[in-house]
């Protein structure tokens, strides 16, 4: 979830709990070996044993189409001791696909195989190499070809987003298609896509046959979703207001003030899906631009809630 779920939000969400593992936003690999500082800047958890401050493991995700360059970068990345390396064959963004990255590669199962195999050979055996794919680019006609290419190349796990690139993020997700993949490959398969509630998760697992889920927008919209799936108590709206303030503080050193307010409103906008009170908060800050003004308004809402 580029532009949304970065290391600051990973920090906040893993403090809520219930998450077994995170995957970083994709790190774009083109035609050069990236310096170590790029990896530690995009994934500062590498400086903390590949863990968030709450102790949740984080796997680094690479995106690209050059097997040799990806392998070279994966080898350097492995020296920084990530929890694992994930390969992105699922991004539907037009700009990424135009530059031959993400879901467009699902038209080329042979290349997908070469990428996974090259990365697997380049890193130590104890470092997991996983992959994420969609059902296909324009359709799912090569779905099994791609899944088998990933499995035969030595991947340890496969995450499947149950839509094609052409589907984008429009409902529904075709969870039953994941079941076809799961039956064809001999490696753990994780289901992803359109899981917003516990009921969604139960239907997804039943239709996909998977016993593990990757949560994306559903978790950002409902930070307590992972806990709810475990049958544990989930945070109320009053518990989330301090997390919004924490998120604002975490992004302050690296996001220019004129953009920081937008980032806070972006997350608040997503929270409206699960928490009715987020609509009130969003309406209160919607016309504000300065991050400090937004912080003050949210703090005032928290004070009103405590008083009430």
Image (tube, rainbow, N blue to C red):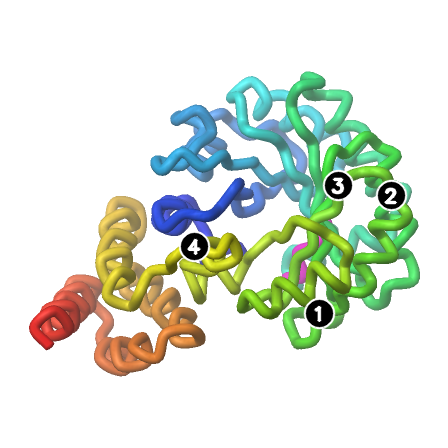
Q: Residue at x 36, y 74 (%)?
A: 275
x and y percentages locating residue 52 in the rendered image: 40, 36
Say left or right for 170 vs 35.
Answer: right
Q: Residue at x 81, y 30 (%)?
A: 154
x and y percentages locating residue 111 in the rendered image: 85, 41
Of callouts 3 and 4, which one flags the residue occurring earlier in the amino acid sequence?
A: 3
Which stretch appears magenta?
Answer: 89-93
What number is the disc on residue 185?
Answer: 2
Image quadrant assignment for residue 205: bottom right
Mark 4, residue position: 232
Q: Quadrant of the N terminus?
A: bottom right
Distance from disc 2 to disc 3, alpha carbons, whole Å, reads 8 Å
Mark 1, residue position: 173
Q: Residues within 10 Å of mark 2 (few under 14, many from 20)?
A: some
Q: Is residue 98 visible?
A: no
Mark 4 or mark 1, whichever is nearer to me: 4
Distance from disc 3 to disc 4, alpha carbons, whole Å, reads 25 Å
């Amino acid at each position: 979830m580029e532009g949304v779920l970065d290391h600051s939000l990973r920090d906040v969400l893993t403090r809520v709990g219930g998450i077994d593992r995170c995957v970083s936003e994709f790190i774009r690999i083109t035609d050069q070996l990236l310096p170590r500082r790029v990896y530690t800047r995009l994934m500062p958890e590498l400086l903390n044993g590949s863990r968030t401050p709450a102790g949740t493991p984080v796997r680094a995700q690479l995106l690209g189409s050059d097997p040799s360059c990806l392998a070279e970068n994966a080898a350097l990345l492995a020296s920084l001791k990530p929890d694992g390396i994930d390969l992105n064959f699922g991004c539907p963004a037009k700009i990424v696909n135009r530059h031959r990255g993400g879901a467009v590669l699902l038209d080329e199962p042979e290349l997908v195989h070469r990428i996974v195999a090259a990365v697997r050979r380049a890193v130590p055996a104890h470092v997991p190499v996983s992959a994420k794919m969609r059902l296909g680019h324009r359709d799912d006609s090569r779905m099994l070809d791609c899944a088998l290419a990933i499995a035969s190349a030595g991947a340890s796990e496969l995450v499947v987003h149950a839509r094609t690139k052409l589907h984008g993020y429009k409902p529904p997700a075709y969870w039953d298609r994941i079941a076809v993949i799961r039956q064809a490959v001999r490696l753990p398969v994780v289901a992803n896509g359109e899981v917003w509630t516990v009921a969604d998760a139960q239907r997804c697992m039943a239709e996909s046959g998977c016993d593990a889920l990757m949560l994306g927008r559903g978790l950002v919209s409902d930070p307590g979703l992972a806990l709810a799936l475990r049958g544990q108590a989930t945070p109320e709206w009053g518990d989330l207001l301090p997390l919004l303030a924490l998120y604002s503080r975490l992004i302050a050193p690296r996001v220019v003030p004129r953009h920081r307010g937008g980032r806070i409103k972006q997350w608040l906008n997503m929270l409206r899906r699960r928490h009715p009170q987020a609509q009130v908060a969003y309406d209160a800050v919607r016309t504000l631009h300065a991050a400090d003004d937004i912080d003050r308004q949210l703090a005032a809402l928290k004070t009103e809630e405590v008083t009430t």
